[in-house]
Image (tube, rainbow, N blue to C red):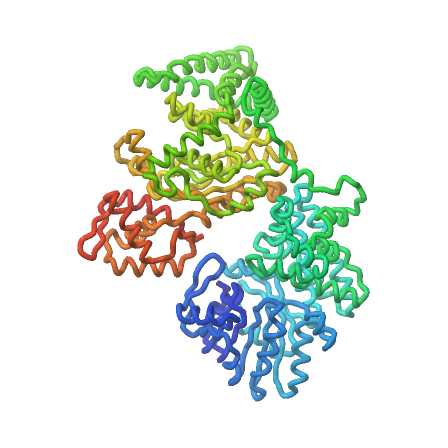
Amino acid sequence: MIDLEEVPPRFKNIAIFGGGPMGVHLSVSLSEKTENLFLWYFDKKNADRMQKDRTTEFLDDHVPLPNNIQVVSDFEFLSKGSWVIIIAVPSRQTENVVDRISSVLSPDEEHTMVAFTKGLVSTSTRKKTNAVTFSDYVLKVREIKDKLDLEYVAVAGPNLLSEMAKGKHSFFSIASSGERGSEVIEGLFSGPRNHIKTFEDIRSLELVGVMKNPIAIACGILSGIPECGSNFEGELISLGFSEILSLLNALDLPAKPAMEFGLADLITTATSRSSRNRAYGQRFIRKLISGEDSPNLLERIELFFNPKEFIQKEMSQSESHVEGAYSLSTILDLAEEKKVELPLFTTLFEVLTRKVSPTEMIRFVSKSTSDEIRNISRTARKRFGLTLASGKEFQQALRRRVLRHVHSQPGMADRILKQAGLQIKSLEKRYAEAVENEAGTDLFLLPKEIVLWQEAEETYEKKHTRNLERLVEFYVSEIADEYSPFFRESLIHLVAPARFAIGGFKPGGGLPKIGGQIKEIKALASRYDILYTPTHRSHLDSIEVAFGLRWLGLPVPRYAADKKVMATPGLARVLKSLGAYMVDRKRNRNLLYLECLTQYSTMMLEAGIPTLVYPEGTRSRTGGIIPIKTGILSTSVEAFKHTGSEVLVVPIVLSYENVPEDVEFTGKDIHLSFRDFLFKRTEVYMDLCEPIPVSRYIHEDDPTLSISMEISREWQAHHRILPNHLVAKLLMEAGGEISLSDLEKMIAERILTRKGNYLTKDTGEILNRGLKVLQSRKFIRKEDEMIKALDGDLLQYYANMVPDPT
């Protein structure tokens, strides 16, 4: 929460209007500054619930409400006493809220209104009252009620809520209608990481605070077009700022405050990942290009007759309030009255109302008249090259790519050849093990590989020649095997009923239960190249993903399967038909082999072949999410750089009620038969996360790292919390023994205070189902009304599957 100095309460009454994230944050942060704090929420039902439960949602978590906070939905509480009133409602509600507040405030007391909401009054109100900004309107109201002692303070930034909540440095640019207002702000927000700057012209501060938001939307839209990077966004921000200054000048408002605080606020809002307006623009362009955005007949009629209402209606259906969409038409109306041209704002309005393509903003910013800038062709075109997945032609292309890359990187060939001795020793050791275990494949292939390394080492030492051709040919022929998509479809249809029967003919027995961003990904998959990035829990993961994607009608990817799994001839044939290609994880320190794998994955993406990689690198032995290894993710970045065509990274979360290998992971020497392995699979859930366009991060210093962080966030948010996972978590937190009644209370409290992707939020269902699964596996014992742990290792394994809050 916001970093405030701990001082005795100096304000008797504070009222915060707005039950959204900002209102909740301010309420909790300022509760120590006052004796009585009222949090107003427009919805009576939700206000009553918050007052009763004493908790509410804040960003991605639940927060308890301090005892001195009362949640209300009326205005009568304002009728007595002196009040500090903080406005944090959406701008479209502000005029009505101000009217209601002013009608009940006591004329015999001093009041201060602090507005975090920045906006312009509606066009109709402006024509009636000549007010332009909210401060104008409040002062008009005060004139009408001539005995009302009310001062108004406008607050601007840069002060992003997400950073304020984490106690990071924030800046409060304020302007007040009187001296008391500035003193109130100092009393409320003074703190070592809160920096307050005071300006004289309140209207300039408000206008800049309003006009920054549409510019942030425009930056979000252009960030989804690969041709537009940071350079382009910088130019757009510059043009937007000049239009802000033009409107200030037309209103006879000083430009100096805009120079001092407005530029910082604009840059932060337009470029930060935490900006809601920028995020709205990114969602808009993604849906537009994918084809998911397709207005129906009634919407097209509304677009034609009342485009302003359409934008506001569309915004109201989004996940969060986006002030830029609400204020855009009002800004343009005001500019028209003042005879000021705002070409960037006008172009954005036409884009949002589907009159022109987003590329018109490119034409405007670049001042281009070229016909090449008509379509977002490079992001909307998908290549189809499934036939290039295997065969001699593909292998030859892969060999050339690997050799070219190895020899073009300074010192890489030398590093590979200098480790030849280590590779030979490792291979000889593996061959001895293969002889002992009678491993047929290794007995046939390892001697050949040893000879190839010996030849390469000898040539390097005696002739100083970096000859890697035969080794590359050996590895490429092993990796880029024969693959026939035709057999995959038939096999899935044949195997699915068998899986269903093995699963006891229960729902989810043949397929995983699928959730998440299904509609959006299906719309995007036909246009973009896809890299699937699932969590890794079991050898079954790739099969679950293949069946789930095929059921949805999404492209089924090629994926790497361990050589150990592919050693069984019958299973290898099945896995190959499902898209698997063999990898040898024992070569994890073989630089040349790893380079062949990386280039293979990159070439498949470039050819339009959907690909699957496991960013964790290996199956999780702990049950929790493993830190991502970024190396394999670089294939998506390289494919984008080579082709200029968009690559979508689609994180997938696989959640198992029972992981077949769980006993193995806890160190118990128990080997399951293939039949028992399959029977241990019960409920499996597959959630498709928000797709990540590579183009969004391509201009960053380390795009692969940024993509990996985004994948981790999506995994955390979408991971299914199953009943047996949660019960195991709470039981282990209680020391391995707990009463039924206490366990039920802990479940209810957890759901209330920790946000998560729970399978169900019904406390009784979680308790009963979780206990049933754990008892069936003999992980716990129930004695009278007590639950006792029997296998702490396995309980902890499943407890780790409950993501910790980030």
Percent across and percent down for residue 459 are 52, 12
| Of 631 and 567, the residue lying toward us | 567
Please indicate, yes or no, whether residue 629 appears anywhere in the rendered image: no
Q: Is residue 705 left or right of residue 451?
A: right
Name which residue lies at 61% across and 68% down: 117
Percent across and percent down for residue 452 are 48, 13
Name above or below for residue 718 compared with residue 492.
Answer: below
Name above or below for residue 753 compared with residue 474.
Answer: below
| Of 574 and 94, the residue lying toward us | 574
Name which residue lies at 51% across and 81% down: 76
Percent across and percent down for residue 299 are 65, 56
Name above or below for residue 645 compared with residue 128.
Answer: above
- Total labels: the figure holds 0
Name which residue lies at 45% across and 48% down: 718
Residue 792 location, quadrant: top left
Q: Residue furthest front?
A: 297
Name above or below for residue 789 compared with residue 134.
Answer: above
Percent across and percent down for residue 735 are 26, 53
Residue 436 location, quadrant: top left
| Of 290 and 211, the residue lying toward us | 290
Please indicate, yes or no, whether residue 723 appears anywhere in the rendered image: yes
Name which residue lies at 37% across and 37% down: 500
